[in-house]
Image (cartoon, rainbow, N blue to C red):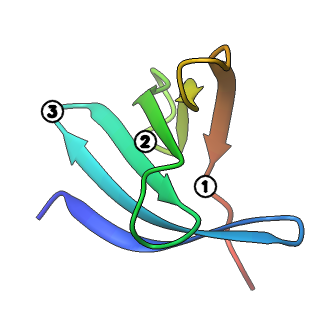
Amino acid sequence: TGSLQGRLVQGASTAQVVVDWDEGEFTMEESHDGQRIAATWLGTATEGLCGRQIEGQRLQGEATAPARFTMRAVRLR
């Protein structure tokens, strides 16, 4: 409950991810080799969109500045 695992596809790149949803807080850990965490995504649901959009920051190591992200639910046909 509250956790899932899957794949993150960004263009030609695919990463393994583990996602937790706890009391409105979204945390996703991204791994390129299945063993080490390459980035951590931290976010919250956008108010008024019923959990269909999450906004936050992607943290990738200490030397890289956090990057803002927005994830939106997409219906596949």
Q: Are marks 2 and 3 in contact (CB under 8 Å)?
A: no
User: Furthest-left residue in view?
Assistant: 1
Eyeballing the image, is 32 above or below 19? below
Sequence-wise first label, 2 or 1: 2
Pointer 2: residues within 10 angstroms few (<14), some, or many (20+)?
A: few
Report, in whole angstroms, how far the alpha carbon at label 3 lies from the one at label 1.
19 Å
Query: In this rendering, which labeled residue sits more in front, label 2 or label 3?
Result: 3
Q: Position of residue 41 (x, y in %)?
A: 48, 37
Q: Are marks 2 and 1 in contact (CB under 8 Å)?
A: yes
Left/right placement of residue 7 relative to residue 68 reads left
**Residue linked to disc 3:** 23
- Of the pair 19 and 51, the residue shown nearer to us: 19
Residue drawn 67% across the image and 20% down it: 64
Q: Quadrant of residue 8?
A: bottom right
Left/right placement of residue 19 relative to residue 64 reads left
The amino acid type found where label 2 is placed reads: Gly
Pointer 1: residues within 10 angstroms few (<14), some, or many (20+)?
A: few
**Residue linked to disc 1:** 73
Quadrant into which the N terminus falls: bottom left
**Residue linked to disc 2:** 51
Report, in whole angstroms, how far the alpha carbon at label 2 lies from the one at label 1.
8 Å
Pointer 3: residues within 10 angstroms few (<14), some, or many (20+)?
A: few
Query: In this rendering, which labeled residue sits more in front, label 3 or label 1?
Result: 3
